Amino acid sequence: MPKDHGIGAPSKRREDVRFLTGQGRYTDDINLHGQAHAVFVRSQVAHGRLNGLDTTAAAAMPGVIRVFTGADFAGVGGLPCGWQVTDRHGQPMQEPAHPVLAQGKVRHVGDPIAVVVAETLEQARDAAEAVEVDVEELEPVLDMKAALSDGAPLVHDDLTSNLCYDWGFVEENREAVNAAFEKAHHVTKLELVNQRLVPNAMEPRVAVGDYNTGTGDSTLYTTSQNPHVIRLLMGAFVLGIPEHKLRVVAPDVGGGFGSKIFHYAEEAFCTFAAKALRRPVKWTCTRSESFITDAHGRDHVTRIELALDAEGNFQAIRTETHANMGAYLSTFAPSVPTWLHGTLMAGNYKTPLIYVNVKAVFTNTVPVDAYRGAGRPEATYQLERLIDKAARELGMDPIEIRRRNFITEFPYATPVAVEYDTGDYNATLDKLIEIADLAGFDARLAESKARGRLRGLGINCYIEACGIAPSHLVGQLGARAGLYESATVRVNATGGLVVMTGSHSHGQGHETSFAQVVADMIGIDENMVEIVHGDTANTPMGMGTYGSRSLAVGGSAMVRATEKIIAKAKKIAAHLMEASPEDIELKDGAFTVAGTDRSVAWGDVTLAAYVPHNYPLEELEPGLEETAFYDPNNFTYPAGAYACEVEVDPETGKVTVERFAAADDFGNIVNPMIVDGQVHGGIAQGIGQALLERAVYDEYGQLLSGSYMDYAMPRADDMPFFTVDHSCQTPCTHNPLGVKGCGEAGAIGSPPAVANAVVDALQRAGHASVTHIDMPLTPARVWAAMQG
Amino acid sequence: MTKVTMTVNGKAVCGEVEGRTLLVQFLRERLGLTGTHVGCDTSQCGACVVHVDGRAVKSCTMLALEAEGAEVTTIEGMADADGGLSSLQQAFQDHHGLQCGFCTPGMVMSAAALLAENPRPSEAEIRGYLSGNICRCTGYHNIVKAIMAASGQDVSAIAAE
């Protein structure tokens, strides 16, 4: 029987009621008294020199309050980058300035040039049309390899080239890896593209700046996954506002998927302008604007090789990746193709030697940063496509070749600098074979064939490193931030609790699952626990939500704070019952003296804490409120096995996903319903990447797929029902909940399953030369592959 | 500016609007009914779906003036008479048919319109009907399941954990 409350129960989400009745409070729902509206004038060319800007006509338009340009931001800092990568020669990456509004040059379509602030949105929009921009177009830098050739135009004139860094990992292994390839029995090679994606959270970004002239305090309401990070970056590096005079609020946020981690120019602008104009300033992104301003994801071009012996044992892996940074370094961009990608190249396998080379390149495109999975989908896709190809070349079963190379003993130190604490890859693969009904595949294949359809089966494994991250480690790797998380647990006199967390929920359901954990620890009803997040004014400094870290890191902080609460409450209970604190037990919301029938209720103790008439005041402070910061000592390593079955229409090349199964090991589970939902959403994004989505630039640097008319978002009729399972559980060994994180797994594990399935379908139909098709596997690409 | 009058969630409302004012702007900005969302500017995402004279309409694609005299229902008008969740809304909660909640009002409004014209839709009919509503969180699995459950169908066999 599943539990009906506490840890492990599929508790219904309390946040749903407000979302289902239209009572959510998203940033665009916030309107402040006296608010003005901002509309950005953006570059319409990919690369150009700004020779002049005439705002005279716009400033004279009805309702216009002021037109801001780059000159207004001359004394203001640029948008900072939060991660400095060191290249293979020990040199720091090239790090260009990133102005709030363009200074001298524009570097991608959408780069902000000026902002009109007016009484109404319509007036601001009309006046923005009247700003005259004199731009001298320059040759755009678009292709990554061309960008690195001699004589290529420079995206940033003050850098020596368009190369951000040339990273080698592990550099010391390079020669040993090359030697292993020279004596290999067999080498499988693959060149592939992990295409650029647009994250497309359904809520477009919004920023509302406010300034209190009486106190000198600034407030920013913004669509962020990490309001404390925005406060720190914007306050300290851009606007020079100390944190105690700056409040950042991220209320209900309509999805993030990474794109709302980063500090964006519009946030700094609205905060700055509100102070300059002494009135609130609001900016709401249109979807068209989102496409050319939200950080994009992926965009890697990779050559990967696998050396094998005659039995199919992996001997070595060697990769070379070009990673697109876009025009500027977004907040965490440099870490994605390096520490979130290179460290995952061992996958689930005991390959002894690995060398990863990544060249990060500036181009005249929208900046690229973390998008659900961030580096780990790229690693998984390369590895799992390559293994499938190797199995085919060696005539081995794709499941057998994986099993042969599985890591089976833990902890396991990979040759790419991480140590897997625990896992059981055979268990998830066995579970997958069961839930995907692989035994029934041949019958389904015959049925498809009878209808004139090709059918294919793709399977793959994945591992990810999440629960980001040990601060001491990421500090050594170039992070300019710590990656702990925080929680304050405030117990009220009548026994209810408020938990203030530094993490942020934008769809993950923390308000429900976090309450389950605390209620379970104390033995009280979940409804006695309220979760507060998203406002720097009433939550402890925290690093926010991304990298599947909220429960593993934020939840651990909450557990630590609750443990402190329980320890203190036991002392109070001991005093009330005239017993020793060591003899006090807490169960089902009551404190008892072990071995006796003496007990006091939770509420008696909390009341005593705040009405300390009978209380050990000489030993214990009144009150019941504790804070904990938790810094993990390792990443967590969720892993699993996925299977996809597709049908391909031989006439058109159209692929349909007929079945999809996922067997994941997330360690312990707090709310299985929410975990299922996280996996479903990740799989859909992975299928979207595999079959539908691609950000396409033309030769002028114009984004052709710049709206939902052109960018193929996955829709309900593109998806089947999914079969997901998380009953294989090897609990994380180093956090108190034994949890691993589930937010990104679906997006990491699913693209290779789909691609493997399509290649399998074509191979079974006799297209022996088709060993790889780049994503998205559109009908045109699949049809072309079938034509040879 | 032109005066427009309509009935929204059973209440008569009126306001002065520009010719270019969209119905969704009128609902959100004039009436403060912020449950209806704007997720795109090309009439694709469906976060703004409301009912106009009983039909599901993308309120970003209709001028406020076009709704003159119409009966409009928004997500704020979907709860039961006693203020509790309707059976459709309850099915979304029971089956975890929402995560971030941003597309949810449009999903509920589209689903309600579907069930009004087809009380027992198949999975394929639901997926087809929702092709104008984009969700980035759920992979649609639990939305489709919730709508099937709300129409009285047994969903216990659908891809359990």
Image (cartoon, rainbow, N blue to C red):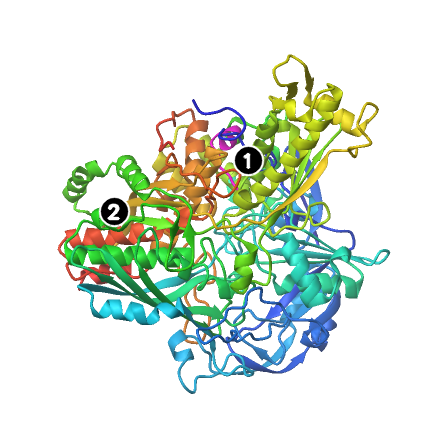
Labels 1 and 2: the sequence-earlier one: 2
Q: Which mark is residue A403?
A: 2
Q: Nearer the viewer, residue A446 or A79?
A: A79
Residue type beneath disc 1: Ser
Question: Which residue does the numbered mark 1 point to in the structure image?
Answer: A513
Displayed quadrant of residue A612: top right
Would you place residue A142 above or below residue A374 in this image?
A: below
Q: Quadrant of the N terminus of chain A?
A: top left
In the rendered image, the vertical position of residue A754 relative to residue B72, given as above or below: below
Q: Which mark is residue A324?
A: none
**Residue depth check, mark 1 versus mark 2: number of the one nearer the observer:** 2
Q: Residue B95 colored magenta? A: yes
Q: Is residue B49 positioned above or below A12 on the image?
A: below
Q: Nearer the viewer, residue B18 or B9?
A: B9
Say if the magenta span includes residue A625.
Answer: no
Residue A695 position within the rendered picture, expressed as x and y whole percent measured from the top left: 42, 63
Q: How many marks?
A: 2
The amino acid on which the numbered mark 2 sits, given as a three-letter code, is Arg
Chain letter of disc 2 in the image: A
* Residue B70 visible here: no
Answer few, some or many: residues within 10 Å of disc 1's Cα (few below 14, many 20 plus, some between 14 and 19).
Answer: many
In this rendering, position of residue A693 left or right of residue A68: left
